[in-house]
Amino acid sequence: MRQTKMMLLCRCAAPWVLAMGLIGTGLPAVQAAAPAAPTLYSQLGGEAAIAKVIDTFLTVVGGDPRIAPSFAGANLPRLRTLLVEQVCEATGGPCKYTGRDMKSSHAGMGITEAQFNALAEALYTAMDREGVPYALQNRLMALLAPMHRDIVTR
């Protein structure tokens, strides 16, 4: 009888002893969480790559007669900075957008659906020229698309 009690004690203690042994060896008792998926910001190549896309975008916009006149009096260096900040922040990067909200920024400008679409085309063209993969282009455009309601007023 004494031997049976001892065997039960050993059988019951074995899992506990095993667990303590694993903890002592540093092996994780629980599986580690999966690493976070890379942000769109990092997939685009970070701030420098975003800035290149914005530079190309502004060049394309400047050459498009449908929308270039809307930017005639714009402070282009400031606009460039704000666009880089905006895309950087929207894609999960470390930047903070320092401009006004889209509604107040575009109030009174009378932006049309056609002008908005021309800007979207210009951004696609810029991303193509800078080698941004199509899937990433669509992800970025999906992030920016909700601004439509605050920008288009006619």
Image (spheres, grey):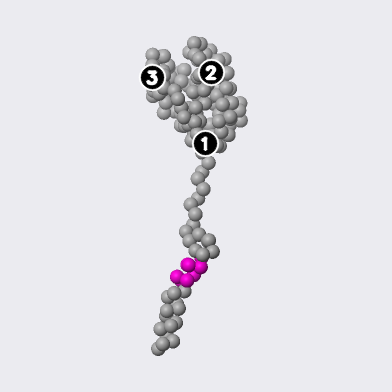
Task: Give the amino acid type for the residue marked by disc 3 in the picture.
Answer: Ser
**Mark positioned earlier in the residue sequence (1 or 2):** 1
Q: Nearer the viewer, residue 53 or 100?
A: 100
Vertical comparison of 76 with 27: above or below: above
Q: Is residue 42 above or below residue 110?
A: below
The residue beneath circle 3 is: 104
**What residue is shown with label 1?**
40
Between disc 1 and disc 3, whose residue precedes?
1
Residue wearing tag 2: 77
Q: What's the residue at 44%, 87% (across, down)? A: 3
Count how many numbered circles sit on residues in the image.
Answer: 3
Range covered by the magenta-colored residues: 15-22
Tell me residue 105's x, y (percent): 41, 19
Query: Is residue 134 in the magenta section?
Result: no
How far apart are the two marked residues, 2 and 3, measured between alpha carbons? 20 Å
Q: Element at badge 3?
A: helix
Quarter containing the C terminus: top left
Q: Name the amino acid, label 2.
A: Pro
